[in-house]
Amino acid sequence: MGVVEEVGPEAADHLSVGDRVVVPFNISCGHCWMCDRGLFAQCETTQVRDQGKGASLFGYTALYGSVPGGQAEYLRVPQAQFGPIVVPEGTPDERFLFLSDILPTAWQAVRYADVPPGGTVAVLGLGPVGQLAVRIAAHLGAGRIIGVDRVPERLALAARYGAEPVDLDDVDDVAATLIDLVDGRGPDATIDAVGMEAHGGRLVAAAQKAMGLLPDALAQKVTDKFAVDRLDALHAALKGVRRGGTASISGVYGGELDALPMMEIFDRGIQLRMGQAHVRRWTDEILPLLLDQADPLGTLDLTTHHLPLAEAASGYEMFRDKHDGCVKVVLNP
Ligand SMILES: NC(=O)c1ccc[n+]([C@@H]2O[C@H](COP(=O)([O-])OP(=O)(O)OC[C@H]3O[C@@H](n4cnc5c(N)ncnc54)[C@H](O)[C@@H]3O)[C@@H](O)[C@H]2O)c1
């Protein structure tokens, strides 16, 4: 998020110097075959074809285009005729900041979950994405929300927004717990807001660690071809949802050889939806809620730490290790 300093000729109809803008994390042109269908994370203009991947992303490795990222004092914005969202002045940054990534991600997760009105959804993982998914699910009409994590302050924060907390460390089998909690059937939908960072089985953890010890170039080849993810949260999402329900996955996975319980998924008739957030597809739906002075999604009630850019590295460490009650760090250049 920032202020426009310069505008290229092709973006001049969309932006002016001095505009306050939020820039989506994925780079989309807004007019290709995929963008015409709202599949902005698959934009064919910015797809990273040499890696066989979807749209370019800011601040990622070669896998998604090596585009320098936004945690900087200045940012060059490709496809600026479409991406940046102009937002009004006069409110704290956090009211709009999360529009660049975690808010549309959580919105997509809930929309993909397709919870029937008054139905039940379980959100696995209560980091920033899971927290917002809880709030959005409540806003979009879910009747009952269950939130699963192991970090006490994250469970408590989700509970403040109406989630029934389930502490991972209190249960042996998350899927069985979800089924028990919801009429012996399970919730209508599950949202995996954990991804490959999930604390997983020891074997996978050992394999991941071993890859960490390989020289970079070799590790890259190994991870591209043979990577396995830690799948605890995903398995819980697939096995804990009710028969005929939907598992919506916003947590990022990158394994090529992940084993999935296909018989269970098939027999139980589970619908699966997933992927990078198509940010601009959802921003028009979200923006009115951010302009509402009542702040219905509690955007000002998520950030736990503000740090200068120079302390970004320690901010990432604190976030990873969940120290000091850290839920969300905002970097202020
Ligand atoms: N799809 C997208 O476009 C998109 C965009 C942004 C983030 N993401 C992904 O969403 C995921 C969540 O992001 P975040 O910023 O909230 O991260 P986070 O790491 O803060 O949150 C993950 C939470 O899951 C909890 N957890 C770990 N294992 C669990 C398990 N087995 N069951 C339940 N909870 C478990 C952790 O304690 C943590 O609180 C990440 O994978 C991130 O990469 C995806």
Image (spheres, rainbow, N blue to C red):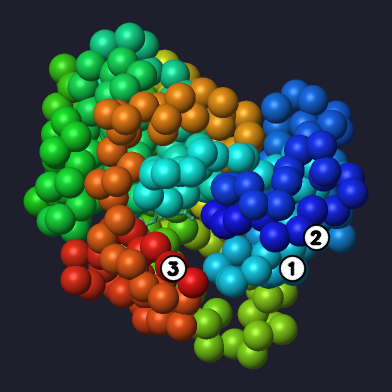
Distance from the alpha carbon under mark 1 to that under mark 2: 11 Å
Residue 78 against residue 69 in the figure, above or below: above
Q: Which of 15 and 166 is in front in this view?
A: 15
* Image point (29%, 18%), residue name: 142
Residue 258, visible in the rendered structure: no
Please rate how many residues cluster around mark 1, counting C-alpha atoms within 10 Å: few if below 14, some from 14 to 19, many from 20: some
The answer to whether the beta carbon of the residue marked 2 is less than 8 Å from any atom of ligand 1 is no
Where does residue 45 sit, x and y in percent of width and height? 86, 44
Q: What residue type is labelled 3?
A: Asn
**Which mark's residue is nearer the viewer, 1 or 2?**
1
On screen, residue 81 versus residue 305, left or right, reads: right
**Which mark's residue is nearer the viewer, 1 or 3?**
3
* Earlier sequence position, callout 1 versus callout 2: 2
Quadrant housing the N terminus: bottom right
Query: Which residue is denoted by mark 1 in the rendering?
Result: 66
Query: Which residue is denoted by mark 3 in the rendering?
Result: 332
Q: Nearer the viewer, residue 300 or 16?
A: 16
* Image point (54%, 39%), residue name: 87
Q: What residue type is labelled 2?
A: Gln
Where does residue 257 sit, x and y in percent of width and height? 60, 56
Which numbered circle lies on residue 128? Answer: none
Q: Nearer the viewer, residue 9 or 214?
A: 9
